[in-house]
Image (cartoon, grey):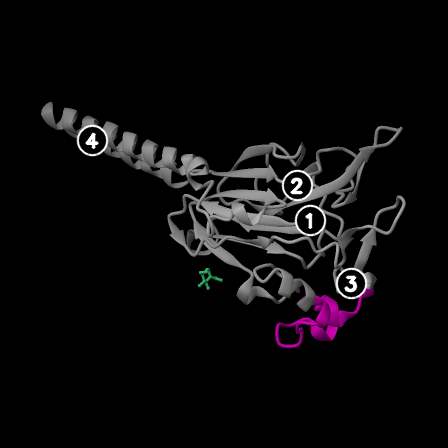
Amino acid sequence: MAKLQFSIVLLTLCFISSINSIQSATFTLTNQCTYPVWAGILSGAGTSPLPTTGFPLQPTQSNSISIPPGWSGRMWGRTLCSTDSTGRFTCLTGDCGSGTIECNGGGAAPPATLAEFTLNGANGMDFYDVSLVDGYNLPMMVVPQGESAGNCNVTGCFVDLNRNCPSELRLTGSGAGDESVACRSACEAFGDPMYCCSGAYSTPQTCNPTSYSEYFKTACPTAYSYAYDDGTSTFTCSSANYVITFCPTPANSRKTTGAGQSAESSGSGSLAKSVGVSSVIVFAFILTSVWSL
Ligand SMILES: *[C@@H]1O[C@H](CO)[C@@H](O)[C@H](O)[C@H]1NC(C)=O
């Protein structure tokens, strides 16, 4: 009888620890821009859909979402959005074609800055990057927090590339003036295989940086500037939560100030706490059953 009880306790222990090891991640999207941004989210094929695929963020506003283990997908910001007289919602940059605030499986129309994630990939690591391969529409930063292993570097493109965007790449607003609202990739602007890493240029050996990709790389050294820019642009981390900020300011970087980390790392703190609490409960169970032998 006591043996059976002991086995049940052991099973419970295994069950609780397996729950803790596949804990979901929290992604917090924050808008530090002076203008509203509509977040867009596209889940990768074959991963769990998220409860939301798009939502507005007013300046200084944040929204936290729970991301299931093994999720992959991309997040971006839509700007200059409005609803027309027929009720159709569209954005001048990053539009996902759904006609609504939710993207419902639609991806970002280029040019758009993208944050890309593959959670719990090879060796259980999270892979993440910020990509300008599809062009640029606003500054973005990804900050891992509360991680257990990995390089976990902050990445992103922190500067405004619209203002100095080469004129041949410039996407301008439909209204008055020639204000640049986004900066296209050379691939999108010219469709040349040399810029798109396609055709004869479809391998890492044959597709090289160009003066256009170097414009992006110089301004944003940790972001992807062309398709085979992996070496300096992809990052790994383990069991982290992620803060994705639109229009980060240098003060938001933990590398310079360390600010924001204590407030935001509470998620993993509570994970550590829940692991601690369940261990205590299991230990008490074991003690009780040993006592009753
Ligand atoms: C992460 O940052 C550190 C310190 O700045 C740097 O030495 C390292 O090369 C970076 N890792 C990657 C993968 O870029």
Find out whether the residues at labels 1 and 2 contact each other: C-beta distance under 8 Å: yes
Q: Quadrant of residue 33?
A: top right
Q: Amino acid at mark 1?
A: Leu
Other residues around mark 4 within 10 Å, as few (<14) / some (14–19) / many (≥20): few
Q: Earlier in the sequence, mark 4 or mark 2?
A: 2
* Real-space CA distance between mark 4 and mark 3, rounded to the nearest whole angstrom: 64 Å
Other residues around mark 3 within 10 Å, as few (<14) / some (14–19) / many (≥20): few
The verdict on label 1 being within 8 Å of ligand 1 is no
Badge 3 marks a residue whose secondary structure is loop
Q: Earlier in the sequence, mark 4 or mark 1?
A: 1
Observer-nearest of 95 and 34: 34
Residue positioned 71% across, 54% down in the render: 136
Residue ID for mark 3: 166
Badge 2 marks a residue whose secondary structure is loop
* Real-space CA distance between mark 4 and mark 1, rounded to the nearest whole angstrom: 51 Å
Other residues around mark 2 within 10 Å, as few (<14) / some (14–19) / many (≥20): many
Quarter of the image where the C terminus is located? top left
* Real-space CA distance between mark 4 and mark 2, rounded to the nearest whole angstrom: 49 Å
| Residue 265 locus on image (x, y percent) | 42, 38
- Which residues are the magenta region? 187-213
Residue positioned 37% across, 48% down in the render: 148
Residue ID for mark 1: 138
| Residue 183 locus on image (x, y percent) | 75, 56
Residue ID for mark 2: 33
Q: Amino acid at mark 2?
A: Cys
| Residue 192 locus on image (x, y percent) | 79, 69
101 lies above or below 292: below
